[in-house]
Image: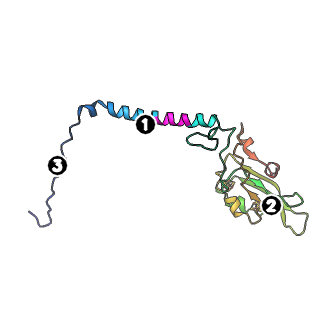
Amino acid sequence: MDKFETKVKVMKAPPPRKRSFWEDSYLPEIIRGLSITAHHFWANMAYHMKRVLGMHPKERQAITYQYPEERRPLSTRVRSLHRLTKREDGTPRCVACMMCETICPARCIYITGAEHPDPNIEKHPVSFDIDLGVCVFCGLCVEACPEDAIRMDTGIFEFAASSREGMIYHIKDLLR
Ligand code: SF4
Ligand code: SF4
């Protein structure tokens, strides 16, 4: 045998364990699975009935939220529909610096800026559109804004539209 040759020890697989009659029939496991399901069903039904009867109005247990009548409380950090913030005189805080448009990874912000009538403010947005059909709700536009002019704290999630154009929100929608 060559000195570099190594012996390979062939490991034999252990013989398969013999299953009992009951294991082969699956019956005990089926009964066990059904009893777990039944336990959850009746427990949830009991919680639900208690809640319906007003015995534990605050106890949620496994009861789901009855959407849309009942809404899940939102986290303070949740990112929802965008809005443009306003100055005291009602004009947008946005100075059309294009930071949000530049950072947006989905390229779904379109801004047209113009000179502001107030000489202390350089620019203002003539148009500010966000295509929500393309937006990925990353929140980078909010992070990038130096003026706190755009926020995603409206708590609005229901903005479905029947056309792609309907998903484009214009400045008047964002200021509302
Ligand atoms: S949330 Fe993200 S994807 Fe949506 S507009 Fe802002 S930067 Fe763009
Ligand atoms: S980053 Fe802020 S100030 Fe700049 S264009 Fe966007 S919303 Fe306006």
Question: Which residue does the numbered mark 2 point to in the structure image?
Answer: 94
Q: Which amino acid is tagged 3?
A: Lys
Q: Which residue is mark 3?
A: 12
Element carrying mark 3:
loop
Q: Residue furthest bottom?
A: 120
- Where residue 169 appears, as percent x and y from the top left, is 76, 47
Viewer-side residue, 18 vs 173: 18
Q: Which amino acid type is marked by label 2? A: Cys
Q: Earlier in the sequence, mark 1 or mark 2?
A: 1
Task: Classify the position of the N terminus by image quarter.
Answer: bottom left
Q: Mark 1 vs mark 3: which is more N-terminal?
A: 3
Local secondary structure at mark 2 = loop
Give the spatial CA distance, label 1 vs label 2.
57 Å
Mark 3: give few (<14), some (14-19) or many (20+) Cα within 10 Å.
few
Left or right? Give the position of 87 relative to 52. right
Neighbourhood count class around disc 2 (C-alpha, 10 Å): few under 14, some 14–19, many 20 upward: many
Q: Return the residue at label 1.
A: 36
- Compare residues 132 and 143 and report the one nearer the observer: 143
Rendered view: 132 above or below 51:
below
Helix, strand, or loop for circle 1? helix
Q: Main secondary structure of the magenta part?
A: helix
Verify whether residue 40 appears in magenta.
yes
| Front one among 51 and 118 | 51
Q: Is residue 157 magenta?
A: no
Within 10 Å of the Cα at label 1, are there few (<14), some (14-19), or many (20+) other Cα atoms?
Answer: few
Segment tinted magenta in the rendering? 39-46
